[in-house]
Image: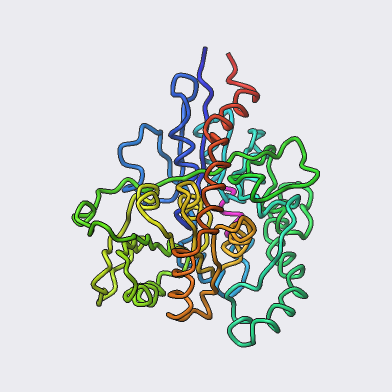
Amino acid sequence: MKRKKILFVAEAVTLAHLGRPLALAQTLDRHRYEVHFACATGYDAFLQGSDLSLWSVHSISSAQFLAALAKGQPVYDDATLAQYVLDDLRLLQKVRPDVVIGDFRLSLSVSARHMQVPYVALINAYWSPYVAQRYRVPAIPLSRWLPVPLAQRLFSLVRPMAFALHSRPLNRVRRSYSLPSLGWDLRRIYTDADYVLYTDTPEMFRAHDLPRTHSYLGPVTWSPPTALPSWWDALPHGRDIAYVTLGSSGQGALLPLVLQALASLPLTVMAATAGAGAPEQLPENARVASYLPGELAARRARLVICNGGSPTSQQALAAGVPVLGIAGNLDQYLNMDGVLRSGAGILLRSDRLTEQQVRDAALRLLLEPEPRVAAQAVAQQFEHYDAGARLEGLLAQLPGPAV
């Protein structure tokens, strides 16, 4: 029997969109699936040692992506998405997959349909039209110029219009391929696929009236393949550990402030810079590396401090460790709402951050029992979800290769 040919396409604007499909690709049974993986160049260090068939596609730079988020502007324009579609079509014609799985590769909404290839989208549940959400004003110019309560009121008024503006580029590209508009709700843009898999649990993000083509995959955790730093086995014994990583999504500049806030606490701090340089001056209790194995680091820690995004939050909660999320973009605020509802963390704004806020929040999460109990309850929920097995269950239902 011929193996099903599966193509993963990662829009590598942040490590989350690279790591999730890569983690899932590595779970598939090679006796049943021929697995291909496409992403932008420059990520060889994360792909080393894999048995995947590798392909290159263009993605905008992380800097361009993050700059657009910081300004509250659309990430993609018509020309960029039109070029993405052409790149996708060339890739699909070369690989001829039975199924294509995309993580934030919005152009597959057009290219996969044009090639008549079943398309599976990976997305966080909080972007689903079927999950009720509270939209906090993110760290955009509006929130920097105005008091947060006033900025929130204005943001609530303009958000539907902003979502419509962000939806326009893909709708225009779809029209050029004779595909119907997806409307003006950005959540429809993000979840347009033949099948949609939420990389979350329903306990944290409950859906209503969910169509049969949407389902929960469960958390997908991934750590970069990296050597342990020299200090990993030499950390002081008998002291609590805080794991700090502000990720690749814009809050890295706050790392010196966070480390200084923790300097006076009876902690050992291990921090990852996500490839950026280490701060020039390090407190005595801090150890820093470019990358750390996040799952192992979370299991060693009693507190995880991150940008509030789902990858590190899920690593922490899977280990039963509470989360201090320092959120900037809307995605991080939406994820942290789920963490807050579970009782397993604290949210701070990146655009209003002070050392005292970080210190006070860290002490609460370290000393109060309730957040840890809540995080342990979430960890038990996570144990019921095997994302790789759930993905294979879906793939088994889809048509295979022609004999």
Is residue 131 in view from this perspective? yes
- Check the picture and name the quadrant holding the C terminus: top right
Residue 252 at what x, y percent from top left?
41, 69
Is 302 above or below relative to 347? above
Q: Residue at x 54, y 34 (%)?
A: 386
Q: Residue at x 52, y 62 (%)?
A: 308
Comparing 298 with 256, the one in front is 298
Residue 44 at what x, y percent from top left?
33, 47
Q: Residue at x 33, y 63 (%)?
A: 271
Whether the magenta-drawn stretch holds residue 382 is answered as no
Comparing 299 with 14, the one in front is 299
State the extent of the magenta-drawn residues as a range. 79-86
Residue 340 at what x, y percent from top left?
61, 61
Residue 2 at what x, y percent from top left?
51, 16
Is residue 110 in view from this perspective? no
| Residue 162 as seen in the image, left or right of residue 11 | right
Colouring used for the render: rainbow
Is 284 above or below relative to 382? below
The secondary structure making up most of the magenta span is: helix
Comparing 183 with 26, the one in front is 26
Whether the magenta-drawn stretch holds residue 85 is answered as yes
Comparing 303 with 273, the one in front is 303
| Residue 242 as seen in the image, left or right of residue 93 | left
